[in-house]
Image (cartoon, grey):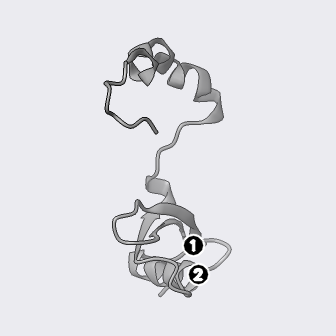
Amino acid sequence: MTPASPEQPWPVWEVFIQPAAGDPHEHAGSVHAVDAEHALQNARDTYARRNEGVSLWVVPAAAITASTPEDMGPFFDPANDKAYRHPQFYKVPKGVKVF
């Protein structure tokens, strides 16, 4: 392991935890680590020390591409004109339980 220094700090890894088998992984937080193995150990020690989950994923934060708040309008607008994606236009057949 390389010691952290102000010139070269350890990279940030995003941590995802699966609470129970079959559940989706959820973002739990972030850890600093020199490599994936170290990141997984840090994630376990930080986010799963009380059996909060059954699986952990660690991903280098630099590998994640995300939209920005400035993208909110143009990036998500095309969904507004697709009314067929909303169930209000469909009739529920008799005998089907409505939730």
Q: Determine the residue positioned at 38% across, 37% down.
A: 97
Q: Secondary structure at mark 1?
A: strand
Q: Position of residue 17 (x, y in %)?
A: 47, 69
Q: Determine the residue positioned at 64% across, 34% down.
A: 69
Q: Position of residue 82 (x, y in %)?
A: 42, 15
Q: Determine the residue positioned at 57% across, 72% down.
A: 31
Q: Secondary structure at mark 2?
A: helix
The residue indicated by pointer 2 is 46
Q: Determine the residue positioned at 41% across, 72% down.
A: 20
Q: Is residue 23 above or below residue 52?
A: above
Report how far apart the C-alphas of labels 2 and 1 lie in the structure: 8 Å
Q: Position of residue 75 (x, y in %)?
A: 51, 24
Q: Which mark is residue 31?
A: 1
As rendered, which of 94 and 27 lies closer to the eye? 94
Label 2 with label 1: CB-CB less than 8 Å: yes
Q: Position of residue 30 (x, y in %)?
A: 58, 67
The mark that comes first in sequence, 2 or 1, is 1
**Residue furthest to the right:** 6
Asked whether the viewer can see residue 69, the reply is yes
Q: Is residue 70 above or below residue 3?
A: above
Give amino acid for label 2: Thr
Q: Find residue 57 and report its image quarter.
A: bottom left
Decide: few, some or many residues near mark 1? Use Cα within 10 Å; few <14, some 14-19, many ≥20: many
Decide: few, some or many residues near mark 2? Use Cα within 10 Å; few <14, some 14-19, many ≥20: some
- On screen, residue 77 versus residue 7, left or right, reads left
Give amino acid for label 1: Val
Q: Find residue 95 and report its image quarter.
A: top left
